Amino acid sequence: MSKKDEIICLGKSFASKDERRDYFRKELRKKLPELKKIEGFPIGDDEDILDLSDPPYYTACPNPWLNDFIDVWEKEKEGIAGRKKDFKVDGPYASDVSEGKNNPIYTAHTYHTKVPHPAIMRYLLYYTQPGDTVLDAFGGTGMTGVAAQICDNPDNETKFKIELEWKQMFGKMPTWGKRKAICGDLSPYASFISHNYNTPTDFDLFEKESKTLLENVIKECSWLYETKHTDGGTGSINYTVWSDVFNCSNCGKEIIFWNAAMDMERKKVIDKFECNHCKSLNCRDSAEKTWITYFDTQQNKTITIAKSEPVLIVYTYKSKRFQKKPDSYDLKLVQIINETPIPKWCPTYELPYGYNTEQPKKSHGVTNIHLFYTKRNLFALSILNNQIEASLLPNKQKFILTGLINRSTQMNRVHVSNFFFGGGGWNAGHLKGTLYIPSLPIETSILEQISNKIASFKKAILLLDKTYTNLQFVGSASETLMKDNSIDYVFTDPPFGAN
């Protein structure tokens, strides 16, 4: 092993990242019995926790190496340019901070309470010096870690904007330079996203593995999204609009909500719609849904759910986009998919009792997690997950999977204004803070989403740090294992659970 290839981590030398990771995973395994005694230890199998972890930098449980890193970082401070021995902050940072959410890092992965990293950078630049240790124990997706990284090398637009503010507010330039961040969260999901934002990604390997991943998923799943063009050729579905089906309050016959409530002349969805059989008026809020009983291949039992029909397909054929009403080929394909067992694992966990979880149970019969997805998208996600397991970069590519699952559920709504008047796509996303399934859900192709997410993450990778400088863990903010008086600055953007 040459000195050039040598990896030094906490005083130990390794020939590769894999060797380092394997060594510390074995050490983490030894420590798990004691770590499990800590309040906030995640519920999960040991092997899953170890597989997800990239120790000692990221542990999907409390991180036992935090103090070791802090000691190393303290020693490194002495050689960092720009540090002042008499550094102090005389008053609070008292300016409003406003930041957009369109930068490539922010858009690479969705999360319901994410703060744009340039907003956090203002506080780090004001309250800390280069080399200081920052703790965010409610770290969510790790934007504090990203901010700490990018204080060293900001993009031109962010740098210009912040320096202009500093001149106007303080009459001087901010002290640029990397800070070290520790990001913790009780949510394994959030910390996993944080890990991907705060640990380096081999761009070339990611690009190569992602290309292979996409090719393999297309090979196995393209048939799920096939449709026929008017000339008999085969197109690829981009998305499908589905519609609730109601029973007429007067005659009891079925009413497809899309057909009855989408007023094409007035270009709006109407609240009271006419039954096409008896012409009586029905209201969506009071009309009774049509329910069907069918055999669920995932649970291996018969279940009852609200009936839904595909009503519109948008597809690509010979590089052009078209839209059509589903024909006999499309309806037969849906039937085949629904009757075909998914060959690979997918989650089927039962929804727990709760205020929000009762809504999808009552409105659509969604009692288990997999029922939030159409069978077609569930099938494709299962294949995607299985392909990722065989990848050389499973954690980085799981970032792609977790980044698209929100857009893959039946909770996503048709953007009615864009449908009628054009605009930035028809998928309006899901209603935030609920598990609401709309009457007109939109099923976006998993194949199209994979391509988009790969491209999005590649843009973010180019802006993120190329070295391991931050730490992440899953655990309680009050049980971090850190020594007292070891942190230079605590950034707290409090949790939003009460919302």
Image (cartoon, rainbow, N blue to C red):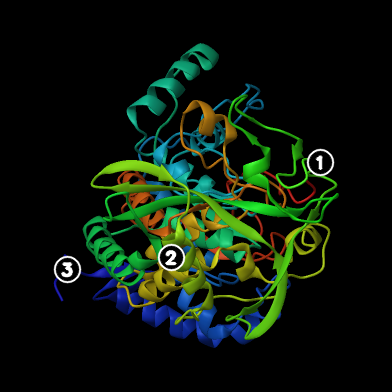
- Give the residue pinned by disc 2: 398
Question: Disc 1 to disc 3, how far (Cα)?
Answer: 82 Å
Three-letter amino acid code of the residue under disc 3: Lys
Looking at the image, which is closer to me, 457 or 284? 284
Instruction: Report the residue at 59% width, 25% height from top.
Output: 265
**Could you tell me residue 42's position as x and y percent?**
65, 73
Mark 1, mark 3: which one is toward the viewer?
1
Of the numbered discs 1 and 3, the one sitting upstream in the chain is: 3
- Give the residue pinned by disc 3: 3
- Give the residue pinned by disc 1: 280
From where the camera sits, is residue 412 visible? yes
Of the numbered discs 3 and 2, the one sitting upstream in the chain is: 3
Question: Disc 1 to disc 2, how far (Cα)?
Answer: 50 Å
From where the camera sits, is residue 70 visible? no
Three-letter amino acid code of the residue under disc 1: Ser
Looking at the image, which is closer to me, 349 or 42? 349
The dot on residue 347 is none
In the image, residue 89 above or below residue 33: above
Mark 1 and mark 2 residues within 8 Å of each other at the beta carbon: no
In the image, residue 139 above or below residue 71: above
